[in-house]
Amino acid sequence: MSAKKIVEPVIKGQFTYKDLPIAAMIPVPATSLEYKTGVWRTRQPKIDYGKCIKCLLCWVFCPDAAIKRLEDDSVNVDYEYCKGCGVCETVCPVKAISMEEV
Amino acid sequence: MARQAQERIAIMGDEAIALAVKQSNVDVIAAYPITPQTIIVERLSEYVANGELDAAFIQAESEHSALSICVGASLAGARVFTSTASQGLALMHEIVYATSSMRVPMVMAIANRSLNAPLNIHCEHGDVMPERDSGWVHLFATNVQEAYDLTFIAFKLSEHPDVQLPVSVNLDAFILTHSVEPLTPISDEDASKFLPPRQPLYSIDFDSPATFGTMALPDTYMEFKYQLKEAAEKAGQVYPEVAGEYARISGRRYWYFNSYMADDADAVVLVLGSTYGTLKVAARRLREGGLKVGVVGLTMFRPFPEKQLVELLKNAKSLIVMDRAYSYGGLGGPLYMEVLAMLYRNGLRIPVMNVVYGLGGRDFRLDEAEAVLKIALDGARRGRFDEHVRWWGVRA
């Protein structure tokens, strides 16, 4: 059984109790790689690169390491794992990050 | 050899359980001593020390740890046994639920004893009742032979691929644990045939890693609990097949309950555990006097054998349910409340009374059993009882 096969129906909400492994056991390793927790998000950050000063405060404060630091110290958001908490928006000193409805 | 094993021996309940566990070829026993089950694990530790049983015997530092060790060992594929009573079971409580919810096969003997306070070491079912809703299969023995036989049946049922649940074998403190009774054991050969080495459906395996006991959030938790509900009900469905297989090797047939002349009885008394024997003798005496009484001793309390009990009780005119436990502030004892609900939803409107008896090991004698049966008969004649719940013999 592949990790993807187990995780996908759960994420999509298309399963019955019979489709789940017995007693919440996870029969294969590393299923979390397939579990894109970004789907929990109801709002998501949008970066205005015109305002960004590359201070990296958002990169430091993101509780889920979902702000990625690039070679030139600019940042982008890993939407597969960003849960939309909005900490980055709060700490940004130049208001370059705004939270938008998903 | 088989012939020798069929000879009757004299043995106390705890020793009979230990013998059955030895013959079941268990791999791991983890336990912590507590009266009145101590003799079970004492004998098992002797069997292991003497080389009569090839198993790991682990003395834990508490019952909570003992059951946790059992969970790990069972997940590793071992056939596992533990035993406890009263406070020990209460200390296990958290892991009791983990065991069934993680679908871990194992067998536990519970030497039913009252719970503190006041401190008391004697017979009561108040220790197992808090585990009623856990998903464990709960079997009750009425005598030493049953305690022995049900241990084999418990292993088989527990490891059944459609069940995969822990099973408890309940035996009354002292009345069964420490009483010497005649026992006809099965041969080691038959035992091994009935219980070949365990074939786990899944187990801890370094070559094929898996995760057990994970978290499940609101999106899946109810489905996992529904799996447990289905498994518990399945245990009731496969039980006759397992018990039937045991009957073929032992000649002793087990059912969801023992019943004595209950089919045509006007008045029936329903009970758990050893008091069935007392009531049976009393009922026989009253039958000799032409009084139509019957007695039922429930062997399987969880899953609850609703269909079979309704079928048995459909012609009864009155029913007394006896509880050796109580739900304080509730409607009565736990068995009574269950039976009331069962009768109501099956449209059986007969008068029902609850007799709460024997708490903390108070004796329930033959003359008292006769008196309860006569009250049941009176209820059948009059079509009603004067009270819902009577605390039998209490100085109130």
Image: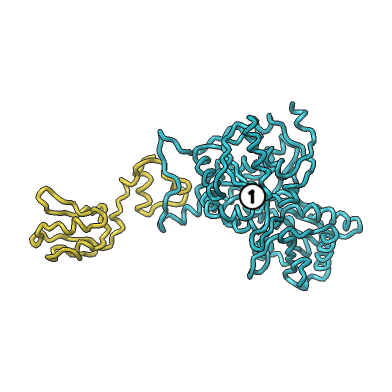
Chain colours: A yellow, B cyan
Mark 1 belongs to which subunit?
A: B
- Check disc 1 and give the amino acid type: Ile
Q: Position of residue A84 (x, y in %)?
A: 25, 60
Say few, some or many: other residues with alpha carbon within 10 Å of mark 1 (under 14 / 14 to 19 / 20 or more): many
Q: Is residue B94 visible?
A: yes
Q: Which residue is found at the position 56% from the left and 45% from the top? A: B163
Decide: is B86 above or below B47. below
Is A82 on the left or on the right of B58, as rendered? left
Of B66 and B303, the residue lying toward us: B66
Q: Which residue is found at the position 60% from the left and 44% from the top? A: B82
- Residue topped by disc 1: B34
Of B35 and B67, the residue lying toward us: B35
Of B211 and A7, the residue lying toward us: B211
- Placement of the C terminus of chain A among the 4 image quadrants: bottom left
Is B237 on the left or on the right of A18, as rendered? right
Of B138 and B396, the residue lying toward us: B396
Q: Is residue B346 visible?
A: no
- Placement of the N terminus of chain A among the 4 image quadrants: top left
Image quadrant in which you'd find residue B241: top right
Q: Position of residue B330 (x, y in %)?
A: 64, 69
Q: Position of residue B181 (x, y in %)?
A: 79, 43
Image quadrant in which you'd find residue B124: bottom right
Q: Secondary structure at mark 1?
A: loop
What number of labels is visible? 1
Residue most toward the left? A50
Image quadrant in which you'd find residue B206: top left
Residue most toward the top? B1
Is A99 on the left or on the right of B134, as rendered? left
Q: Which residue is found at the position 63% from the left and 53% from the top? A: B302
Q: Position of residue B333 (x, y in %)?
A: 68, 64
Decide: is B138 above or below B187. below
Is B238 on the left or on the right of B262, as rendered? left
